[in-house]
Amino acid sequence: MSLTILTTHDLVCGYQINHPLTSPLNIVVNKNDIVAILGVNGRGKTTLLHTLMGINQPLSGKFDCRYPCCFVPQNFTCNIDYALWEIVVMGSVKQWGLFGQPDKKTTELVRDNLTQLGLEKYYYSPFSQLSGGQKQLALIARALLTKCKILLLDEPTNALDLYNQKKVLNILASLVKQQDLTIIFTTHDPAHAMNIANKVLLLDNKQYQYGSTHALLTENNLSQLYHITMKKIVLTKAQTIIPIYDQGQ
């Protein structure tokens, strides 16, 4: 039997009680699940992640979480141009304190995580000089250093080229097995959910659907969700789903 690690109980997210962004959510996330959250802009995808992190308070309802979560944002900027390893080691700051120094074991773990993500040769490189894909992987490496069991990622492939989108998605899928993680991420691309997620949460206006990726990522469901015709394409060894744009309309 799968171990349940996150459960929501009529959880409503938003900023104004009379204008909630989600309907009451009742979802169950099990250990090693990869859950993709889809929906148009303004439907509360990021707000839901912030609520699960404790950044936002629920408008109503509650959630139970067995482990602490770690949040990986879309973008990260800072006024000081830190080296890559310094950005990553910040993930362990709770262990050695604000004015403390990371020990040898911590710095070795930083190098191990960067090696696992293919960034070891950029160890001393300024963070600002990394590519978009490298920066996203660096933020994932920083999150892993917190030793959390649940990763929450807000559009982890946003603004990345196709190659780096594939690289980040493949690494996320591999981390579930290698690091014994559970992942919840938002995305605007149903193909990304189809590629790595075993469950999806579709956030529509005043309603939601939650369940297996195979059952819910249908042409009909996604066409209703995005208000555009969606077409599923089945290939020899894979399948994907794409929007059909009506030229001139």
Image (spheres, helix red, strand yellow):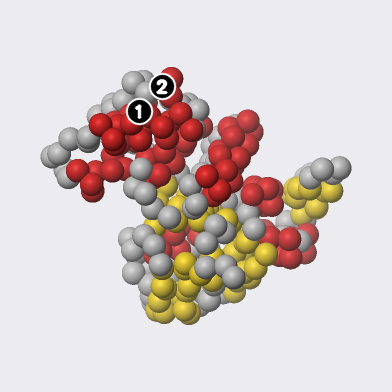
Q: Which amino acid does label 2 sit on?
A: Tyr
Give the crowd class for mark 1: few <14, some 14-19, many >=20 residues within 10 Å. Answer: many
Viewer-proximal residue among 169 and 56? 169
- Asked if the residues shown at circle 1 and circle 2 are in contact, with their CB atoms under 8 angstroms apart, the answer is yes
Q: Quadrant of residue 235?
A: top right
Residue 172 placement (x, y as % from top left): 55, 44
Q: Mark 1 points at which residue?
A: 84
Res 17 seen here: yes
Describe residue 237's horizontal placement relative to residue 97 as left or right. Answer: right
Work out whether residue 72 or residue 59 is closer to the camera in this orientation and state it.
72
Specify whether 36 is left or right of 67: right
Of 16 and 184, which appears nearest the observer?
A: 184
Residue drawn at 86 percent across, 42 percent down: 236
70 over 159 or under it: above or below: below
Taking the view exactly as shown, the residue that stands out farthest to the left is 99
**Residue occupying image coordinates x 50% and y 56%:** 182
Q: Which residue in the structure is indicated by mark 2? A: 122
Distance between the alpha carbons at the discs numbered 1 and 2: 7 Å
How far from the left and from the top, in percent, is residue 84?
35, 28
Answer above or below: position of 69 versus 164. Answer: below
